[in-house]
Image (cartoon, helix red, strand yellow):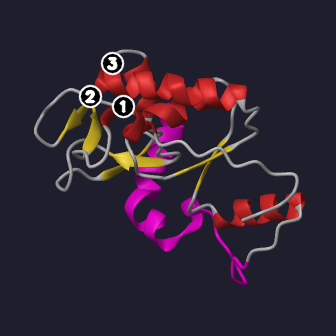
Amino acid sequence: MSAPNVQVTPFCPENFSFGTPRALCDIHGGDGFDVLAGHARVLTEEGEDWTDGMVIAAREMLRIARESDVRFAILMDISAACGSQVIYAGARPEAPYRVGQGVCAALLSEAGIPVVSQRDLKTLKHIFEKIGCEFDFGRSPKDHHETDWYLTHLAQSAANERMSN
């Protein structure tokens, strides 16, 4: 993607704190907001606690976003760091998916920076049109929460989440 009125600011919070290659990690006991509040933890598959490193990475991501005047962030959904709508509900592969944001997505959201999933094709199409950038999103793009996968795996979870808030 290239447009004269767009500046891309790449940042991988997990790479920032843990490098590459790295173990897989997931949020246990809640979502990214719960991690930031100290009520949930980020653990690797081996049980190593990466909570502090993830929070440090989230703060660095927010610092860079503010410094770069980021207007919105396109994040990789399902990640413990960047999940904008969906994360694992504990350790993979046994854990189901759950509605929720990762640690970095939650911190950006708290700071008023909108987060968008790379799977939110309908929203991305509108954004691209606004900034004058052409990209083929297909005839009828859907946002992540409108896809068959999401509806199959998370529709009831999303409804329960809305009712509890």
Q: Which residue position is annotated with label 1? A: 17
Residue 15 horizontal side relative to residue 1, left or right: left
Q: Position of residue 45 (x, y in %)?
A: 15, 43
Determine the secondary structure under disc 3: loop
Residue 25 position (above or below residue 112): below
Q: Position of residue 114 (x, y in %)?
A: 68, 39
Q: Main secondary structure of the magenta part?
A: helix
Residue 30 horizontal side relative to residue 140, left or right: left
> What's drawn in magenta, residue-wise?
136-165
Q: Nearer the viewer, mark 3 or mark 2?
A: 2
Disc number at residue 62? none
Mark 3: few, some, or many residues within 10 Å (few <14, many ≥20)?
few
Q: Amino acid at mark 3?
A: His
Q: Which residue position is annotated with label 2? A: 50
Q: Position of residue 158 (x, y in %)?
A: 48, 48
Residue depicted at x 70% and y 79%: 140
Q: Which residue position is annotated with label 3? A: 39
**Disc nearer the start of the sequence (2/1):** 1
Q: How many numbered discs sit on the rendered protein?
A: 3
Determine the secondary structure under disc 1: helix
Q: Is residue 21 visible?
A: yes
Question: Mark 2–mark 1 contact, CB under 8 Å?
Answer: yes
C-alpha separation, residue under disc 3 versus residue under disc 2: 14 Å
Q: Position of residue 65 (x, y in %)?
A: 66, 32
Give yes or no for residue 154 being in the magenta stretch: yes
Outermost bottom residue: 139
Residue depicted at x 59% and y 27%: 62
